[in-house]
Image (tube, rainbow, N blue to C red):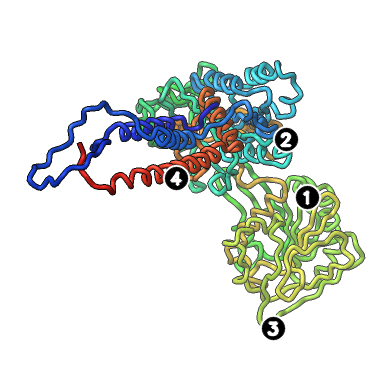
Amino acid sequence: MNFLSPLFLLGALAVAGPVLFHLIRRTTRHRALFSSLMFLSPSPPRLTERSQFEHLLLLILRCLALGLLALGFARPFWRQASAPPAAAAAGRRVVILLDVSASMRRTGLWPQAQDRVASILRTVGPADQAAILTFGRRLTPLLSFEAWEAAPVSARTDLALRRVAAAAPGWEEAHLGDALISAAELLTDGAADRASSGPRQIYLISDLKAGAQLGGLPAYDWPKMVELALEPVKANHPTNAGIQLIAESPDADQQASPSVRVRVSNAADSTREQFQVGWALANGSGNRPAPTDIYVPPGQSRVVALPVPPGGGTGKIVLTGDQESFDNTLYVAVPQKQHWTVLYWGADQAGDVRGPRYFLERALPQNPHLAVTLSAASPDQPAPPADLAAAKLYFATGALSAAAADALRAELLRGKLMVLAPPSAAAAVTLARLLAVPTVGLTDAVPADYAMLGEIDFHHPLFSPFADPHYSDFTKIHIWKYRRLQLRGIAGARAVARFDRGDPAVVDIPVGQGRLIVFLTGWNPSDSQLAISSKFVPMVAALLDLAGGKTDATTQFTVGDALPAGFGADSSSPGLYATKAGAAFAVNLAASESRTEPRVADELERYGAPGIKRAPDPAQVKEQAARLLAADAEGRQKWWRWILGATFLVLLLESALAGWTARRVAPAASMGGISS
């Protein structure tokens, strides 16, 4: 027999009470009659006989009641009869989340992480299921539940350890929140519920740095049945500083004072604060500016401007004085200034402040990375073939000759982009020539007051810059007159914007591999207020992007970013790369990886993720399992009910016997007399 609460057995010592009460007597047992004692002083009786037990059966009943009461509170059970049911023997489902972000490259972290994986796997039993997932910017299965189940029981741990030994930290930033959510959903999906009813546990092996991205974890409803065990690893060196590039303002004069601004950030738990930052030498030789000394207290950052060395600003900037070097190199690719040409056909002159050309020239981007030149062509004759081929984009705001229209159609068929803003219904011939159709229905429309843009497709590249609700209001743009175009009969024509009266306002028409965008109202003040609104410049930039180029000339990317088509490389590791066209671009670490102070555990607790606790000791787990089995056996047997019932029966017998004994003694006491 075993006891769930054995300390209650100490209550059996209370049986000493009735024994003492039966031994201690204040009166004598024999009485004798005597005459009046009024002239004698009373004195206590003198016991001359040794104390003896009286009413032995009554004593036994009282002791038995106390013993049974203590036995019942101790909750006895028979272990032989408490074998757990089959459902209770279900194994655990364990997911090991292994951090492989860039910060795990610090000295001593990865060997510790591998040791933690081995330690956890030693606690996984034959009935348990285990999976190992690595995470950085994305989650990658290292060993799935299916692979674990398919392997022989004796070879599962070795298989897992081999795969962990073959893994290594990468260069991506840690998206911890997404990884935890994916692991929790892996443990709580329908297949997992059917496979096992045992505990579900996530072991997180990470440096738990402050820079880990928690993503949607604060708003996630964490499953109550999933336990999270934190397994933090600690680097050998506490000091870590990182370096990041700061984008220059578009108004910065790079020609007068070419420089690159960088930010040096020092982790909050660092023990150093003096560093140097400067350009790295090319192949160990060359003239480079001397490094710059910089003072950065722990938990703070400083910005320093480094002059661009002779030969350009494409190269490496290195931070020295830091104990950890994984984030001490910054790759810089200064974009070369690009020169684009836009061809324009129209009847207005360059200085005409009321013509569409005037506003178009001022909307074209001019910055240190891009210069766009507007070149006018004669509407009466085609532009030279070299100019047509070199131009990125075509604009026409008037009727074109047949030869000019045919030349532009040939460019459209080859994949170019053209914008046509017919000034009147007379331009219908030009539009029909560009589309190679007999005729198009184009008429003039003059609203009684003014028209506005109503329905707009913000998914179209022309209007996508205004998709945010803060910028999607076009009601302040009044349209004084426009052209009404019949879309029937034009193959593939799609109205991406309509006037408030339902007529098409902007139409996108595919022509071969290219596309023709028709503005059915001009942007000049006599047609509309579009050119003087805040929408016009972003729309022109969107047209240039749609024509095949990016006006921002992006050359800096973060590890894991999706690169544009034509770059011919990936962003899996930091470095300097070249596109297929030969342009340089740089890939660097995310700035969050330099924030290595361990704070994420506190943030998890603040966000209320349940079940956060340290990994339990295997001996404690075994002891807790034994207690649960004992409680289950005792709960099914419930011997305490029978023991308490027997206690009540004994107390009833004791009460009846005590009453019968008292009635026997009463006649003798009623006869009076004194004790002797």
Q: Which of pointers 4 and 1 lies earlier in the amino acid sequence? A: 1
Q: Is residue 346 visible?
A: yes
Q: Nearer the viewer, mark 4 or mark 1?
A: 4
Three-letter code, disc 1: Lys
Give the alpha-carbon distance from disc 4 to disc 2, as whole Å. 60 Å
Give the alpha-carbon distance from disc 3 to disc 2, as whole Å. 72 Å
Instruction: Give the x, y percent position of residue 339.
Output: 64, 44
Identify the image quadrant of residue 237: top left
**Front in this rendered view, residue 327 or 490:** 327
Identify the image quadrant of residue 175: top right
4 and 2 marks in contact (CB < 8 Å): no
4 and 3 marks in contact (CB < 8 Å): no
Q: Nearer the viewer, mark 1 or mark 3?
A: 3
Residue that mark 3 sits on? 448
Q: Which of pointers 3 and 2 lies earlier in the amino acid sequence? A: 2
Q: Left or right: where does residue 58 sit relative to residue 137?
A: left
Give the alpha-carbon distance from disc 1 to disc 3, as whole Å. 38 Å
Secondary structure of the residue carrying tag 3 is loop
Q: Which of pointers 1 and 3 lies earlier in the amino acid sequence? A: 1
Instruction: Name the residue furthest left.
Output: 39
Q: Nearer the viewer, mark 4 or mark 2?
A: 4
4 and 1 marks in contact (CB < 8 Å): no
Give the alpha-carbon distance from disc 1 to disc 2, as whole Å. 58 Å
Instruction: Name the residue furthest bottom.
Output: 448
**Front in this rendered view, residue 203 or 107:** 203
Three-letter code, disc 3: Ala
Three-letter code, disc 2: Ala
Three-letter code, disc 4: Ala
Instruction: Give the x, y percent position of residue 312.
Output: 54, 31
Q: Residues within 10 Å of mark 4 (few under 14, many from 20)?
A: few
Q: Which of pointers 4 and 2 lies earlier in the amino acid sequence? A: 2
